[in-house]
């Protein structure tokens, strides 16, 4: 089994309101092509979300609203097993969100490294699911995502290339099956 870690904002989801950031938990839609890209990963893959959520510390959203936002993302993308998020600028806090729970995982050896470009959330996800950098991939849309992946030695893929690659593969499969 391998581990696919995906950034959320700008990689798999965007605000429906047209604002820069998600305004409330249900103000989110999927980026075109994301379902196709994620569906390319079969049962041999564990898929998790990784996201900075500095809006909590900045006062733009409450911790509860942030947790509800991640849970709504899990409803939109049922192939995601869980989401790791860092709500502070110092990178000292990390929470793991599932459909029904949120767990504070802040007190680990990676505290202070959770916020990307730190690699703490990636390291935590790999440790929780018993994966190494060699069996893990991280997809993101920002330089901070790429830096976090490189810090821990995980293969990185740019979101736009990742989506395009899977859309092309799906198109080729459809062409092959069409008489």
Image (cartoon, helix red, strand yellow):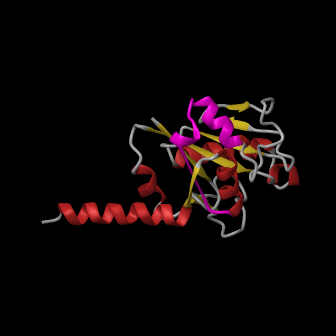
Query: Magenta region: which residues?
Result: 121-142
| Closest to the observer, 96 or 161 | 161
Task: Using residue 174 as the reference point, say whether residue 159 is left or right of it.
Answer: right
How far across and down, in percent of the image, does residue 15 sit? 64, 63
Q: Which residue appears at 58% of the width and 41% of the height?
A: 133
* Displayed quadrant of residue 110: top right
Please name whichever residue, 116 or 101, is drawn nearer the observer in this view of the structure.
116
Report x, y in % for residue 143.
69, 63
- Which part of the image, by quadrant, shows the C terminus? bottom left
- Which quarter of the picture shows residue 99? top right
From where the camera sits, is residue 122 visible? yes
160 over 113 or under it: above or below: below
* Image quadrant in which you'd find residue 167: bottom left
Q: Nearer the viewer, residue 136 or 47?
A: 136
Determine the residue positioned at 50% across, 65% down. 161
For the point 78% across and 30% down, the residue is: 108
Q: Residue at x 70, y 56 (%)?
A: 147
Does the magenta portion include 101? no
Q: Quadrant of the N terminus?
A: top left
């Amino acid at each position: 089994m391998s581990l696919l870690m995906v950034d959320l904002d700008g990689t798999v989801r965007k605000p429906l309101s047209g604002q820069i950031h998600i305004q409330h938990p249900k103000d989110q839609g999927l980026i075109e092509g994301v379902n196709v890209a994620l569906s390319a990963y079969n049962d041999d893959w564990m898929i998790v979300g990784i996201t900075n959520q500095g809006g909590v510390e900045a006062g733009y959203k409450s911790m509860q609203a942030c947790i509800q936002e991640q849970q709504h993302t899990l409803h939109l993308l049922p192939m995601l097993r869980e989401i790791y998020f860092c709500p502070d600028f110092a990178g000292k806090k990390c929470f793991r969100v599932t459909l029904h729970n949120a767990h504070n995982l802040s007190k680990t050896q990676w505290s202070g490294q959770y916020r990307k470009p730190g690699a703490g959330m990636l390291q935590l996800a790999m440790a929780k699911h018993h994966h190494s950098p060699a069996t893990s991939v991280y997809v993101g849309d920002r330089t901070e995502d790429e830096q976090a992946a490189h810090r821990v030695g995980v293969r990185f893929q740019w979101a736009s290339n990742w989506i395009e690659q899977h859309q092309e593969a799906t198109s080729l499969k459809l062409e092959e099956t069409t008489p």
